[in-house]
Amino acid sequence: MRLNPIVKKDIKVQSRSMRICWGVFAYELILALVFFLAMAIIQQESAYSTNNIYSRLVWLYPVLAVTQLIILGVVVPVRTASAISGEKERQTFDIMMTTSMTPFSVIMGKVMTAIVQSMFFVVASMPVMALSFVIGGMSWSYLLWFLAIALLVSLFSASIGIWCSSLCKKSISAVIMSYGLYVAFFLGTMLPYIIYQIAESAAYYNGTVTTVTGYSYGENVCLFWLINPAVYLVEFFVEVMTGESFVSQIPNIGTGTLQTGGPIRYIASGHLWMVLSTVMFVAISILFLWLAARRINPIKKHGAKNKA
């Protein structure tokens, strides 16, 4: 199998630099601080509880895992947001596009470089993560699931960054645009639910709605959560730690009642929500990669000029 030339070049260059060493050091330092803080909280709670402290060490897993995923979600878009725009600023973009590589190969090379770097940091943290499995008694399969989630987060973040990088001429503009898209996925998908619940609550307390049981078609706005990264991660860790679905336990804000029917209750049963959400995140990532490759395609631009 032939390795992407961009991945080969970038990994070789960065492996010779001290930046990767300092990056791993900073990454491990943050994890160590979070680890000691979590241990202090666990010891303090165990002092006022009859439960064994070892039974609480299992909570190191979600704490350390969420910390790493937050770091990946913040750092990876910055790296890919400067991938194409940085080439334009250094005036090397046109030279890169004259090679035999296709636009999609260029995009995938930049994205794969960022993913390899991020997974290198994640793998370097495995000794710390393993403490919650060795001492806390968790199943080792959850460690593999965490690696898969980290890979998905890296792919999704990198695809957003590379698409913004293909649109912008300046790296700073691409970074700002990447974080703006992040906000759209995090908050924009929650906005329909919030608006619906406010309207439902107002109608209930004003006497317009007299019943709060059963299923309302307005609750379908929760389907937007399938592409919300925060809900995705919360759903995963709640299922791991409690065996229950987080989405199915979301009550109506205005009435405090749980949904009793409709597609939400069906999708939230079992692991169907996680499966559908994963498929949608992968599909969105591929869409961003395709749009980025289409954007930097010089043949497409040349053809458009000829038509004009």
Image: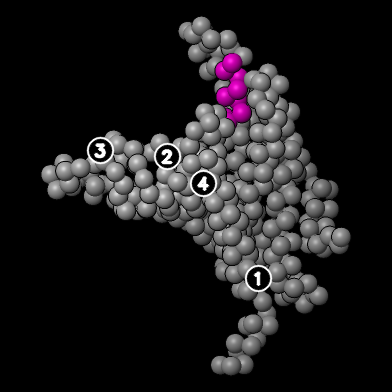
- 177 up-or-down from 233: above or below: below
- Where on the picture, by quarter, is residue 291? bottom right
Q: Earlier in the sequence, mark 3 or mark 1?
A: 3
- 48 up-or-down from 282: above or below: above
Q: Is residue 299 left or right of residue 215?
A: right
**Circle 1 — which element?**
helix
Q: In the image, what residue type sits under mark 2?
A: Ser
| x 77%, y 77%: residue | 98
**Spatial CA span between label 2 and label 1:** 38 Å
- 170 up-or-down from 60: above or below: below
The residue singled out by tag 1 in the image is 293
Circle 3 packing at 10 Å, graded few (<14), some (14-19), many (20+), is some
Q: Quadrant of the C terminus?
A: bottom right
Circle 1 packing at 10 Å, graded few (<14), some (14-19), many (20+), is many
Q: Earlier in the sequence, mark 3 or mark 4?
A: 3
**Circle 2 — which element?**
helix
In this rendering, which labeled residue sits more in front, label 2 or label 1?
2
Q: In the image, what residue type sits under mark 4?
A: Trp
The residue singled out by tag 2 in the image is 248
Given residues 238 and 131, the one toward you in this image is 238
Q: Earlier in the sequence, mark 4 or mark 1?
A: 4
| x 38%, y 38%: residue | 250
**Spatial CA span between label 3 and label 4:** 24 Å
| x 49%, y 33%: residue | 244
Q: Position of residue 197 (x, y in %)?
A: 28, 46
In this rendering, which labeled residue sits more in front, label 4 or label 1?
4
Majority secondary structure in the magenta region: helix
Identify the mark at residue 273; answer none if there is no mark. Answer: 4
Q: In the image, what residue type sits under mark 1?
A: Ala
Q: Position of residue 102 (x, y in %)?
A: 75, 73
**Spatial CA span between label 3 and label 2:** 16 Å
Please say if the residues under marks 4 and 2 sit with CB atoms less than 8 Å apart. Answer: no
